[in-house]
Image (cartoon, rainbow, N blue to C red):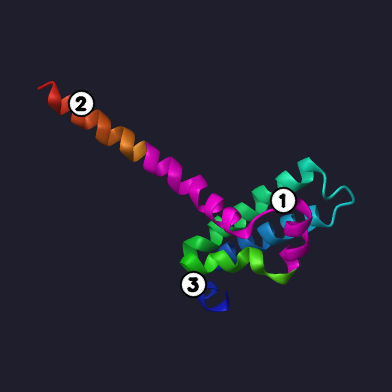
Amino acid sequence: MLICRRTMTDDELQQEQKYINDASTISQSYSFGADDTCEDFRKVLSSLVRFRFNFCGDLSRCTCSETRWEAPIVRCGYDCERIWREGLMTESASQKIIAHFIVYFLIRMFMWW
């Protein structure tokens, strides 16, 4: 991760650290393993993966393989590949859906002329 992190500004490095701290805090909480804390952990980890993807591309896939996340991922029964895909889909899927809707709308509009 170090190579792609070189392109991050100080603010972006702080944002990455915030995601890491949030995920660590959740995974170390007393109630970790409960459905709601596992869901919170998944959301934060997905956000971290999505954030890193902006700088590291497919290398962001390695995020959930980091040693610090292995135990929480196993405890909650998550699949790293799914977390990676989910992290990317959350942002990019909504943009694609909007783009498809616009294209569909434009095609329908031109068909009426």
- When the figure is inspected, residue 37 is found, relative to residue 27, above or below; the finding is above
1 or 3: mark nearer the eye: 1
Identify which amino acid the numbered label 3 is placed on. Answer: Thr
- Residue 48 part of the magenta segment: no
> In terms of sequence position, does the residue under pointer 1 or pointer 3 come before the other?
3
Region rendered in magenta:
68-97
Q: Name the residue under label 1.
A: 41
Q: Mark 3 points at which residue?
A: 7
What residue lies at 14% left-to-right and 28% top-to-bottom? 110
Question: Which label is found at residue 80?
Answer: none
Numbered disc 3: secondary structure:
loop
- Report crowding for label 3: few under 14, some 14 to 19, many 20 or more residues within 10 A (C-alpha): few
Identify which amino acid the numbered label 1 is placed on. Answer: Phe
> In terms of sequence position, does the residue under pointer 3 or pointer 2 come before the other?
3
C-alpha gap between disc 2 and disc 1? 43 Å
Q: Mark 2 points at which residue?
A: 108
Q: Is the magenta stretch mostly helix, strand or loop?
A: helix
C-alpha gap between disc 1 and disc 3? 26 Å
Identify which amino acid the numbered label 2 is placed on. Answer: Arg
- When the figure is inspected, residue 56 is found, relative to residue 90, above or below; the finding is below
Farthest residue, direction left:
113
Numbered disc 1: secondary structure:
helix
Q: If the image is split into quadrants, where does the C terminus sit? A: top left
- Residue 91 part of the magenta segment: yes
Evaluate if marks 2 and 1 touch, with contact meaning CB atoms under 8 Å apart.
no
Residue 40: percent from left, percent from top: 72, 46
